[in-house]
Amino acid sequence: MWLDKVKRVYGDNLDITWKNFSLEQVNNKEPENKVWEREDVTQARSLLGQIAGEAARRQGADLHEKFHLALLIARHGGDGRIALNEEQPLVDLAEQVGLDVERFKADLKDPELAKKIGREHEEATAEGIFGTPTFVFENGQSCYIKTFIPPDEDALAEFEHFIAIASDRPYIGEIKRPQPPWPKGALD
């Protein structure tokens, strides 16, 4: 994925902290009914996927990073779209990246992980975040970006241009391209 390509160049000089945000909650017609408070987590579109990410995080930063990347690829970059509300595909990914599968499966049942997801979501909305991905920079600036994954040869330049505009130029409020096609030439 895009940031993984950039991270390979920057190494330890780029620190990415992934936090949870529920698009399903943002679009919920009954916002008082919190997605992360559902008894059956499979009834939400992606809550189990978020819980799986937190279960992987419990096994260390490196394994979390591997799981998160594998999940993003399986969801957005693979031949199909992995279901984020079914346990077995998530367990299969956990096994592929080397997680302790029994511990992972046990952690999927821990209600504290759903509570953490809820806290992070509410913190984000309190900061004005409304969508994903939203980048929050060390200087306090934040920016939502809608993008296709750039080709490998453009990944680093795209990231650096984005950072220059989003982090260092707070007076630029919005950039939008006419649609469709969106954007011209991106899918050629």
Image (spheres, grey):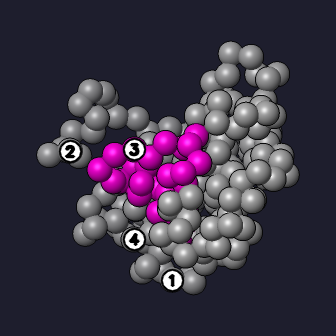
Question: Does the magenta-highlighted stretch encompass residue 88?
Answer: yes
**Disc 4 versus disc 1: distance between alpha carbons?**
10 Å
Q: Are marks 3 and 2 in contact (CB under 8 Å)?
A: no
Per the image, the residue denoted by label 2 is: 187
Residue 92 position, x and y percent, is 50, 60
- Disc number placed over residue 11 in the picture, else none: 1
Per the image, the residue denoted by label 3 is: 81
Q: Name the residue type under label 3.
A: Arg
SS assignment at label 4 = helix
Residue 72 position, x and y percent, is 47, 55
Residue 150 position, x and y percent, is 31, 57
The disc, 4 or 1, on the residue closer to the chain's N-terminal end is 4
> Would you place residue 184 above or below residue 158 in this image?
above
Observer-side mark, 1 or 3, equals: 3
**Disc 2 versus disc 1: distance between alpha carbons?**
29 Å
Name the image quarter holding residue 107: bottom right
Horizontal side of residue 71 vs 176, given as left or right: right
Q: Name the residue type under label 1.
A: Gly
- Given the current orientation, which residue lies at the most extreme front position? 102
Are there few (<14), some (14-19), or many (20+) residues within 10 Å of tag 2? few
The disc, 4 or 2, on the residue closer to the chain's N-terminal end is 4
**Disc 4 versus disc 3: distance between alpha carbons?**
21 Å
The one of 100 and 171 positioned closer to us in this rendering: 100
Horizontal side of residue 28 vs 8, given as left or right: right
Horizontal side of residue 135 vs 122, given as left or right: left
SS assignment at label 1 = helix
Per the image, the residue denoted by label 4 is: 5
